[in-house]
Image (spheres, grey):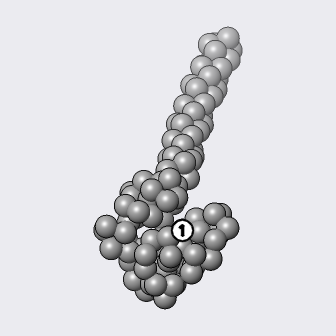
Amino acid sequence: MDQVKIGNFLKKLRKEKGITQEQLAEILNVSGRTVSRWETGNNMPDISILVDIADFYDISIPEIISGERKSEIMNEKERKIAKTMSDYATTEKEKIFKEMKLQSVMGVCALVL
């Protein structure tokens, strides 16, 4: 668990809402210093506060713990899948071209004989 990443994510979410640390602290019934510590990665919110944070930002607790939105995680997975498929397709093309080259050489040799 990367506390700094989580802190940056929490800060990003707060800024998207257009509120200050003090305003968020008041909403969550904690101190402004507590919010600051979360956002710098020095401390993590208590599990009971995580529920309130998730509700406030309309995200899931696993998204908070991972430090990114699910859509960002999915995009990374999709990129990995696309790269794997691309690599596979390239390998298959190379196999087909080698086979065609071999058959062409064999065909020319058969004509010469």
Residue drawn 54% across the image and 48% down it:
71
Q: Looking at the image, which is closer to me, 53 or 73?
A: 53
Q: Quadrant of the C terminus?
A: top right
Residue at the (50%, 53%) spot, across then down: 58
Q: Return the residue found at the far left.
A: 47
Q: Which residue type does callout 1 highlight?
A: Phe
Vertical side of 93 occupied by 112: above or below: above
The answer to whether residue 18 is left or right of residue 31 is right
Say which residue appears at 51% left-offset and 84% top-offset.
32
The answer to whether 74 appears left or right of 103 in the picture is left
On the question of residue 20 being in view, the answer is: yes
Q: Residue at x 54, y 37 (%)?
A: 85
* Circle 1 SS class: helix
Q: Position of residue 99 (x, y in %)?
A: 57, 25
Query: In this picture, is 43 found above or below 102?
Result: below
Q: Work out whether residue 100 or residue 39 is closer to the camera in this orientation and state it.
A: 39
The crowding category of the residue bearing disc 1, from other C-alpha atoms within 10 Å (few below 14, some 14 to 19, many at least 20), is: many
Q: Circle 1 is placed at which residue position?
A: 9
Residue 89 appears in which quarter of the rendering? top right
Could one spot residue 109 in this view of the protein? no
Q: Nearer the viewer, residue 89 or 50?
A: 50
